[in-house]
Image: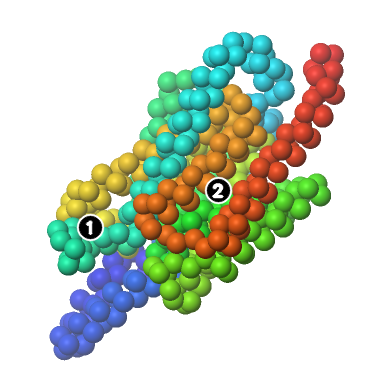
């Protein structure tokens, strides 16, 4: 039963069996906690204690025609959560061709300064986030000398919660300070993107226990292929030939890197295989998140409202699961024992939250193509930075694989930009009419 702390069971065993048996049971459960698949299933079980009652309540309100017959103080809340307030009308802060052209007519110096600010903000936020992520998951805390091993932080879910609670706070303050459109989407629909988002984030942290950071970055770059597949399944999208070509190039480059680059830190084939399985989970979950959010944007909402809705459910899921497992207070205890970890966890959350705001602002001001170029450069710099700081070895063929991946990414940006520019005259004529 997920509502009981997993450490309660050794105490119950102790009441019925000798102390040696109880100690064996405790050590067995502690050993299971080190198995990533067990922790993954435990997290899913915790989320289900929130999802299943929520699903039953939503079905009840829909079947009982509550929208037509409901009344009382709770009616507006239930209506907003279950049914929404408006039909699908399209996202309000997507950048149209006309707004970009109007921006082009302004001061070029001002636009250049904005671009520098966006690029610097994105690079600083996510490069720092990447370095700290690897530090937290792969290094120990509390060692006062090289001979001491120290203590490692193991609960990836707590880091996800830390990131989401600060992002929720930032998004909430933004919505209060700046005028937002009237919200129209049913609130429960955010839970789908939220669940896949926290699972992808968990996989991202957990994978660093088994593989190197450069491998993780390249795997994230290769998620183009599953995103395209998920786009066909979820959104019924069609793609151009150059999109398939660059996807094959990315797969080739990633495969070359994985087959030829090895590090002394992860010599075990079994360990590497576990890391690849977790990364595959990350890519699948993340691909679903982006496509589901695309569908949600068909409702009238801003990107910050999307950020608030997704992070609201993420906080609910993660804190519920952490409390049920008893891991929430264990993680807080770890923070009190190691002030350096507390600083790193807070900085991780700050970089993640403000990085999301820089993403929204950059896309709003300069479009998705410029944003993709900045983030692609960030991924390349992140690999170099990780190799420099943490001593990851990359072979010559592995380096060529990295080059192929980023070449394919830039080709995608170039082809997409050319296609959009060829369509722009037709769009302008339509707008003038």
Identify which residue, 192 or 287, lies in the foreground: 287
Q: Residue at x 31, y 76 (%)?
A: 31
Residue to which mark 1 is pinned: 141
**Residue 44 at x, y percent in the picture:** 46, 63
**Residue 217 at x, y percent in the picture:** 51, 53
Residue 217 located left or right of residue 209: right
Q: Give the quadrant of the C terminus.
A: top right
Residue 58 located left or right of residue 163: right
Using the image, determine if residue 221 lies above or below residue 147: above
Which tag, 2 or 1, sits closer to the chain's start? 1
Picture disc at residue 307: none
Q: Are marks 2 and 1 in contact (CB under 8 Å)?
A: no
Using the image, determine if residue 377 lies above or below residue 99: below
Using the image, determine if residue 330 lies above or below residue 422: below
Of badges 2 and 1, the one in the foreground is: 1
**Residue 326 at x, y percent in the picture:** 28, 61
**Residue 350 at x, y percent in the picture:** 36, 38
Residue 346, quarter of the rendered image: top left
Residue 431, quarter of the rendered image: top right
Res. 241 in view: yes
Q: Residue at x 70, y 43 (%)?
A: 411
Q: Give the quadrant of the N terminus.
A: bottom left
Res. 288 in view: no
Residue to which mark 2 is pinned: 193
């Amino acid at each position: 039963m997920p509502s009981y702390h997993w450490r309660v069971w050794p105490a119950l065993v102790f009441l019925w069996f000798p102390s040696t048996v109880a100690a064996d049971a405790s050590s067995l459960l502690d050993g299971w906690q080190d198995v990533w698949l067990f922790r993954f299933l435990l997290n899913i079980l915790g989320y289900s204690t929130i999802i299943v009652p929520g699903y039953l309540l939503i079905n009840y309100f829909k079947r009982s025609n509550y929208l037509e017959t409901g009344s009382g103080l709770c009616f507006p809340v239930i209506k907003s959560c279950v049914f929404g307030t408006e039909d699908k009308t399209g996202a309000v802060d997507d950048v149209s061709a006309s707004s970009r052209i109007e921006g082009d007519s302004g001061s070029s110096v001002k636009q250049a300064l904005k671009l520098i600010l966006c690029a610097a903000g994105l690079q600083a936020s996510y490069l720092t986030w990447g370095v700290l992520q690897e530090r937290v998951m792969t290094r120990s805390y509390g060692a006062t000398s090289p001979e001491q091993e120290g203590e490692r932080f193991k609960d990836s879910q707590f880091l996800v919660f830390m990131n989401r609670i600060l992002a929720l706070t930032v998004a909430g303050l933004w919505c209060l300070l700046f005028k937002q459109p009237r919200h129209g989407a049913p609130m429960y629909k955010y839970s789908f993107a939220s669940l896949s988002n926290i699972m992808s984030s968990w996989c991202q942290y957990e994978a660093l226990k088994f593989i190197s950071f450069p491998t993780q970055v390249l795997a994230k770059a290769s998620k183009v292929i599953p995103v395209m597949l998920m786009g066909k399944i979820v959104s019924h999208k069609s793609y151009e030939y150059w999109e398939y070509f660059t996807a094959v190039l990315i797969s080739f480059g990633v495969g070359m890197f994985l087959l030829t680059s090895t590090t002394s830190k992860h010599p075990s084939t079994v360990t590497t295989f576990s890391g690849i399985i977790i990364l595959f989970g990350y890519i699948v979950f993340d691909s679903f998140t982006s496509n589901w959010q695309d569908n949600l944007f068909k409702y009238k909402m801003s990107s910050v409202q999307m950020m608030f809705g997704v992070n609201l459910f993420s906080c609910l899921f993660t804190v519920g699961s952490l409390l049920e497992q008893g891991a929430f207070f264990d993680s807080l205890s770890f923070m009190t024992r190691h002030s350096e970890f507390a600083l790193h966890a807070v900085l991780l959350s700050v970089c993640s939250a403000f990085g999301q705001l820089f993403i929204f602002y950059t896309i709003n001001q300069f479009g998705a193509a410029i944003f993709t170029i900045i983030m692609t450069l960030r991924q390349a710099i992140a690999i170099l930075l990780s190799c420099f700081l943490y001593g990851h070895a990359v072979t010559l063929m592995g380096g060529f694989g990295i080059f192929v991946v980023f070449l394919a990414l830039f080709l995608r940006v170039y082809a997409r930009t050319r296609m959009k520019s060829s369509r722009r005259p037709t769009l302008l004529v339509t707008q003038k009419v």
